[in-house]
Image (cartoon, grey):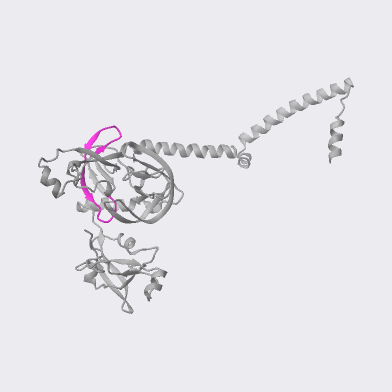
Amino acid sequence: MEEKAENLTQNPQKSSNDPFASKVVILAVALSLIFGSFGGAFGAYQFLTNPKLQKLFPKTSGNAINQNITLNEESAIIDVVKNASPAVVSIVVSKDVSKIPGYGLNPFEGDPFFNFYFGRPTQPQEPNIQEVGAGSGFFVSGDGLILTNKHVVYDEAASYTVLTQDGKKYEAKILALDPINDLAIVKVDVQGVPFLNLADSDKIEIGQRVVAIGNSLGQYHNTVTSGIISGIGRRITAGSSQSIENLSGVIQTDAAINPGNSGGPLLNLAGQVIGINTAIDQQGQLVGFAIASKDAAKALLSFQKNGKITRPFLGVRYVMVTPALVEQEKLAQTYGALIVHGQTADDYAVLPGSPADKAGLMENDIILEVNGQKVDEEHPLGDLLKDFNVGDSVRLKVYSKGSEKTLIVILGESK
């Protein structure tokens, strides 16, 4: 191979010095250009006017297709933000910190020696109103009804101010708190505001593009982040120093959600709300969670019907049956919800006077089915019950004292 390469380099092709041959070559080149141009034009005409030929060849390259997809997606996100942002609000939490226990007290307060020599302060503290928190929300009706998280507006001693995108401020009134979910309904005195519609969260898919809008970190109003749906139907334990809640059926997303985003909308590319941003996993990155819009829609419907958010209540304390629990407790059933007593005397397995108590459920019973639906790790008892309404009759299949039986329970109202 080396010898051939060397020979090719050392013996280049020789040019001809024959004038006649040169003229023939020039004429041949000229004719080729003329007929080539004519052929190219004819081919282009046929391609443009013949649909069959157009189907054989794509009009754009792969890079152009990808660019079009990217541009279309960016355009969709921009449209969502433009249309949805006016309906998203920031919620500012204010409180008289002088009423907080320990405010203004010196480190020796309560010490008998200090009090004997210096006395105790008798003058009341002057009010000191400060912003102590912030969250997000969004209008769900034109007359100022706002949906947000319960943990944003739970403090009865605080006052709440709603800031709209155009910079206006409104005093907010808390109308309803969800007894079992992290949802709340707030009202401001305004008419004709833009509002968002709730989508059917049962129709979302993993990988679907989503947009989150909210009061990020409590200071960056209407911050926009985007991502995808990372998971559906998650069960999480979320909370703070004030409260802890077990949430089920939540949506996981990698759209950045930060403190202050709580209560803001998670939107699809049609601009509809599919979730209410509620929690983040601080141990990871871009692991956020939103309450499914179907749960929010049910809360709104309940409020409109009853003037409050009502949730069905059974009245049992339970743990889900797992292979480990079966082995540990030598259970006769491999699935279901085992009714158990809590750690203290007041942690009843079956709450006295509850619907479960009235139906005859007892400690160590295993609830196997709810209206024919098997109770298992994929379908926990709480998830199945929340789809019912207060006052509904539910048929329970129960394993009790070595045999199966069917009980009818009329669901009460969770307090």
Give the total number of marks visible in the rendering.
0
Asked whether 311 or 46 is in front, the reply is: 311
Instruction: Reply yes or no: does residue 321 show up in magenta.
Output: no
The image quadrant of residue 161 is: top left
Question: Residue 361, percent across and down?
Answer: 26, 72
- Image check: 365 left or right of 190? right
Q: Quadrant of the C terminus?
A: bottom left
Which residue occupies the extreme bottom position in the image? 402
Do we see residue 2 in this rendering? Answer: yes
Question: Residue 135, percent across and down?
Answer: 29, 42
Which residue occupies the extreme right position in the image? 18
The image quadrant of residue 383 is: bottom left
Asked whether 346 or 126 is in front, the reply is: 126
Asked whether 324 or 367 is in front, the reply is: 324
Q: Quadrant of the N terminus?
A: top right
The image quadrant of residue 411 is: bottom left
Relative height, residue 106 to residue 406 (above, below)? above
Q: Which residues fall within the magenta stretch?
A: 161-183
Question: Residue 252, percent across and down?
Answer: 40, 51
Relative height, residue 219 to residue 385 (above, below)? above
| Residue ID at (16%, 49%) | 111
Asked whether 257 or 21 is in front, the reply is: 257
Do we see residue 120 in this rendering? Answer: no
Question: Residue 260, percent across and down?
Answer: 32, 42
Instruction: Reply yes or no: does residue 171 show up in magenta.
Output: yes
